[in-house]
Image: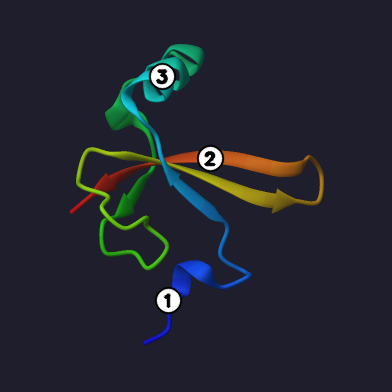
């Protein structure tokens, strides 16, 4: 079976720990539930991600070199 998360076109997905998450939420003055969502079974979601976790996604960008987005894992 092919591991989609290792494909060259899939951006880097990493789980945030609670300390990193607190910094992000403080920076943007939002709650965890205000973040866009990603399903736990999405092929790009890191292994071991559980509902309530937050994933940091780093994508290539034409305008800023790289773009960082955050997603809340849901069932």
Q: Position of residue 12 (x, y in %)?
A: 55, 53
Q: Quarter of the image containing the C terminus?
A: bottom left
The residue at 56%/65% (across/down) is 10
Q: Position of residue 52 (x, y in %)?
A: 22, 38
Give how far apart the Cα atoms at labels 1 and 2 are.
Answer: 22 Å
Task: Mark 1 vs mark 2: give the one in front.
Answer: 1
Left or right of 63 on screen, residue 2 = left
Question: Mark 3 or 2 closer to N-term?
Answer: 3
Q: Which mark is residue 55?
A: none
Q: Position of residue 13 (x, y in %)?
A: 48, 51
Q: Is residue 9 above or below residue 66?
A: below
3 and 2 marks in contact (CB < 8 Å): no
In the depicted view, which residue is nearer to us: 6 or 69? 6
Q: Which residue is mark 3?
A: 25
Give how far apart the Cα atoms at labels 1 and 3 are.
Answer: 31 Å
Q: Quarter of the image containing the N terminus?
A: bottom left
- State the SS at label 3: helix
Question: Mark 1 or 3 closer to N-term?
Answer: 1
Neighbor class of circle 2 (other Cα within 10 Å; few <14, some 14-19, many 20+) is: few
The residue at 37%/19% (across/down) is 19
- State the SS at label 1: loop
Q: Is residue 44 above or below residue 15?
A: below
Q: Which residue is mark 1?
A: 3
The residue at 20%/45% (across/down) is 51
Q: Is residue 38 above or below residue 15?
A: below
Q: Position of residue 64 (x, y in %)?
A: 78, 40
Q: Which mark is residue 69?
A: 2
* Quadrant housing residue 36: top left
């Amino acid at each position: 079976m092919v591991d989609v998360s290792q494909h060259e076109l899939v951006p880097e997905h990493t789980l945030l720990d609670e300390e990193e998450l607190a910094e992000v939420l403080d920076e943007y003055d939002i709650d965890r539930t205000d973040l866009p969502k990603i399903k736990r079974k999405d092929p790009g979601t890191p292994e071991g991600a559980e509902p309530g976790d937050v994933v940091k996604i780093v994508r290539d960008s034409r305008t800023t070199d790289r773009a960082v987005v955050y997603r809340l894992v849901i069932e």
